[in-house]
Amino acid sequence: MITAVRKPMEEIIACVSPYDRILLAGCNECVSVCSVGGRKEVSLLSSALQMHFLKQGKTLEIQEVTLERQCDPEYVEELVNSVDSADAVLSMACGCGVQTVAARFREKPVFPAVNTAFMGASERQGVWSERCQGCGDCVLGITGGICPIARCSKRLMNGPCGGSTKGKCEIDTDIDCAWQLIWDRLKALGLENRIEEIMEAKDWRTSRDGGPRKIVREDLAS
Amino acid sequence: MSNTFEPEIVAFCCHYCAYTAADMAGSKRLSYPPNVKIIRVPCTGKVDAIHIMKAFQKGADGVYVAGCLEGDCHFKNGNLRAARRVQRVQALLDEIGIDSRRVEMITMSAGMGERFAKTAREFTEKIRELGPGPVKAAERDFGLSAAG
C-alpha cells in the first residue's frame, strides 16, 4: 500500500487559516489501512481543527467526506455537490488523491494534510516498512523475494557491501541488510550459487530516470 | 476566570474495574464530586481518540480514561492500548494549543472505591485550576458555540 503520515498540525493550521469553510476529504484505500487518512482520521482532524480555531474565536465549518478512492476521477466526482460550499479542500489522501482532486476542481485551493511516504507492507499492527520503489523492472524472482532496491540502503544490485555487520546495515543497526536477507533466503531455497552470478547494471529508464511514467492499456482505455 | 466555574468531566470507565470501583465508592458512601460524568465502556481498549476529542468538543473541560491495573485487563491488553491512545490525544491537544493535562489515563481495580473517589476529587480540582475547556472558553471569550 501507499503509506503516509499526518503533517504537523501547525502546517495544516497555516494552510486552512485563511478560510472559513473547509471540505475535508479522506480516502478509504491505502491511507485508511495505514490509519492516517480514513474516515476515523478525518473525524479526528476535523475535531482538532474546529477546537483549535474555536479557541482563536473563529468557527471553522468543516464538511467531512471520505471517498472510496481519491485517486479515481469517478469517485472524486462525488465531491461535486459539497465542493461548492467550501472555500478550500483539505485532502487526507496520498499525493495521487490530492492531485486528482486538484485537477478536477481547478478553481479551489487544495491542500494535503498528510505527507505521502512510501510503498510499504505492514510488519505488524502499527508498523509499516518500505518494500517497493516501483523501479519498473522487478527482480524479486532472482533475489529470493527480497528487493535490493527498496531494502538495501545503497540499492546495490550485487551485494552485500562492506558495511553489512551481523545481518544489519551500516547506516542503522535497526535496518536489516537486504543482501544478508537475500543470501539467507537463497540458501533456504538451495540456490546459493545464484549469489555468484553478477547482475548487470540496471536499466533505470523504466524507473523515474525515464521521466514521469504512464501505463496505457489499449484493451481498456477509452 | 469566574469563581463559579464548575468543571464538567467525562470519565470513560471500564465495566470490569473503574465502573465497579465507582459502585464500590457508592456502597461505601464515599463522596466524590458530581462533576464527573461516567461513561461505562466494556473495556478501555474500546475508547478511541475521537471519543475523547468529541467529549471536549461537546463541552467537557477534562476527560479521563479509567481502566484496569496493568496486567489485569479482562481483555488482556485493552488498558495498555487505551494508555497509548491517551498519549496520542495528549500530543494532539498540545499541537492545537490545548493543555494536555486535561486528559489522563488512570488505572484501578474493582475493589478500589477509595481510589475512584480520590481520583475524581483530584482530577476535578486539577481541571478547576486549569479553567474552562476549549469550548467553554470560546463561549466565555467570544460568545461562540461548538460546531461539533
Image (cartoon, helix red, strand yellow):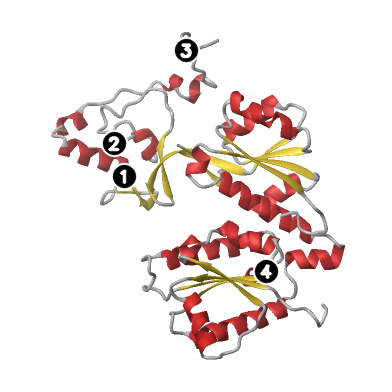
Q: Which residue is mark 4?
A: B99
At label 2, which amino acid type do we have? Gly
Q: Are marks 2 and 1 on the same chain?
A: yes
Q: Chain of mark 1?
A: A
- A64 versus B109 height, above or below: above
Image quadrant where residue B90 sits: bottom right
> Between tags 4 and 1, which lies in front?
4
Please give the name of the residue rendered at 52% of the width and 80% of the height, measured from the top-left corner.
B22
Q: Are marks 3 and 2 on the same chain?
A: yes
Label of residue A217 in the image? 3
Please give the name of the residue rendered at 47% of the width and 12% of the height, measured from the top-left corner.
A217
**Whole-percent x, y for residue B62 in the image:** 65, 71
Q: Secondary structure at mark 2?
A: loop
Do the residues bearing badges 2 and 1 touch, measured as CB atoms within 8 Å? yes
At label 1, which amino acid type do we have? Cys
**Whole-percent x, y for residue A8 in the image:** 63, 52
Q: Chain of mark 3?
A: A
Q: Are marks 4 and 2 on the same chain?
A: no
At label 3, which amino acid type do we have? Arg
Q: Secondary structure at mark 4?
A: loop
Q: Chain of mark 2?
A: A
Label of residue A159 in the image? 2
In space, the residues marked 3 and 2 are separated at their CA atoms by 36 Å
Q: Can residue B40 be seen by looking at this rendering?
A: yes
Q: Which residue is mark 1?
A: A177
Q: Are marks 4 and 3 on the same chain?
A: no
Q: How many marks?
A: 4
